[in-house]
Amino acid sequence: MKEMILILDFGGQYTQLIARRVRECHVYSEVIPWHTPLPEILARQPRGIILSGGPSGVHDEGAPRIDPAIYEAGIPILGICYGMQLTALLLGGRVERAREREYGRITVRMKDRDGLLEGLTESSVCWMSHTWQVTECPSGFHAVAETEHCPVAAMENREKRVYGVQFHPEVTHTAEGKILLLNFLFKICRCSGDWNMKAYAETAVRQIQDAVGPGGTVLLALSGGVDSSVAAALIYRAIGNRLTCVFVDHGLLRKGESDQVCHVFSHLFPVRFIRADAADRFFADLKGVTDPEEKRHIIGRDFIEVFRKEALSLGKMDYFAQGTIYPDVIESGQGSNAAVIKSHHNVGGLPNELGFTELIEPLRMLFKDEVRALGETLGLPRELVWRQPFPGPGLAVRIIGEVTPEKTAIVRESDAVFREEIAAAGLDSRISQYFAVLTNLRSVGVMGDERTYDYTIALRAVTTDDFMTADWARLPYELIERVSARIVNEVPHVSRVVLDVTTKPPASIEWE
């Protein structure tokens, strides 16, 4: 059994981030509900357990509780925020409402820099977010850190290997958070750090082969995005051309992407590949539609109907595959299921409608960055693996107002120019997401000696660690100048380019 850290989720906004940070240290982690029975937790044989933060106060009516016997199981435990307060309460300590609440970056004084805090500086900036705090440690524990207003910013019982921190080591705002996590994983839990995508690929291939059997066939809905492409490559490695991929081309992908998908899965990974060119249908159904949610509904409906028609023409297939990834699993409340095969799982109703009762979901335990790393391990082209995040409805939600073939061509060409210049400037790996939007604004311009009245393109570029919040990217003026000049000169019907300098929140990253 591979070494594993289990994260008990109390509903904290950073729970997924804890799991990602642990995996970034090459230690496998899983998020499970806080109410998972203790025997089930122990049966997983985790090397360590992390108790997440959460929105509740430990004294609230109905606040989450765990079996105190977990602290006697001999497994190292780290409580973070609510997890620390709950540990203190269950073991006889005192938790009280803070006289001075602490939110944001707070300087923490490390009083004992052995054990969990080894290697941290005496005064370290940490991210706090709490109204309640531990005011008295349980018997056998002692405070190892404090702030001006929080007497127990961290506590530990080295004999039982139980630890707690009031701050959040998993967020980048905590300057030395990674050092703390490394101490817990490698010095306290004694992990070896054997989690990597090469080993995962080998294991997943064997699991797919065992599940599908020697003659089984698999049908995969290939969107052209990173997740479904990596899933296709992995399943192909396992069963070869017994995999059939249906690619519904709705005419709303970025420049060159449809052809790239066709090339990759006809030559590099020669699966049985079907391209359904349905652009005319999508544009006809989107005619006159301006509401973003209605656009999404129409595109989703048409995608399913086109895919269903193609799938039914193929005859009987044994399994349905899709590129579900771990954040989807966690958010759907299925975080405790680690199997590659999920029986009777129904996403969007499509598998059931086609007669499937089982899914192949080889990425369901991976985060996005791990999916990209796996794609590189499998030999997918880097430009496909490291594509910018792209909404399911495609360019339709980067066109404000009605979607037409003409407008789609405008935003596609403008976006291509922006992406080319970002890459040429060497900034493509430093900006989290960047794209062009065709606004519904037209304005007066002058080209040559003629008056024009054409569209405005907005450029959007953001930096973020988790996409929950984002800041606008400070692009060099010279780069913006080049992009603007090229778009206006090279893309017909564009007379003006503007830059979106709004953070998230209050704005979203996408415009629709």
Image (tube, helix red, strand yellow):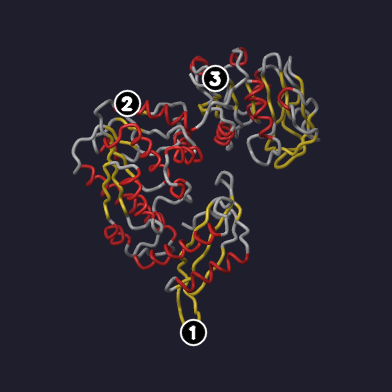
Q: Mark 2 points at which residue?
A: 211
Q: What residue type is labelled 2?
A: Ala
Badge 3 element: loop
**Where residue 151 sits: x, y (%)?**
78, 29
Q: Which of marks 3 and 2 is in front?
A: 2
Q: Mark 1 points at which residue?
A: 448
Identify the residue at image location x=27%, y=50%. 275
**Where residue 268 sits: x, y (%)?**
35, 44
Identify the residue at image location x=47%, y=28%. 199
Q: Give the CA separation, mark 1 to mark 3.
A: 70 Å
Q: Give the CA separation, mark 2 to mark 1.
A: 66 Å
Q: Which amino acid does label 1 sit on?
A: Gly
Q: Which of marks 2 and 1 is nearer the N terminus?
A: 2
How many residues crowd around disc 1 within 10 Å: few (fewer than 14), some, or many (20 or more)?
few
Q: Mark 3 points at which residue?
A: 46
Badge 1 element: loop
Q: Nearer the viewer, mark 1 or mark 3?
A: 1
Q: Earlier in the sequence, mark 1 or mark 3?
A: 3
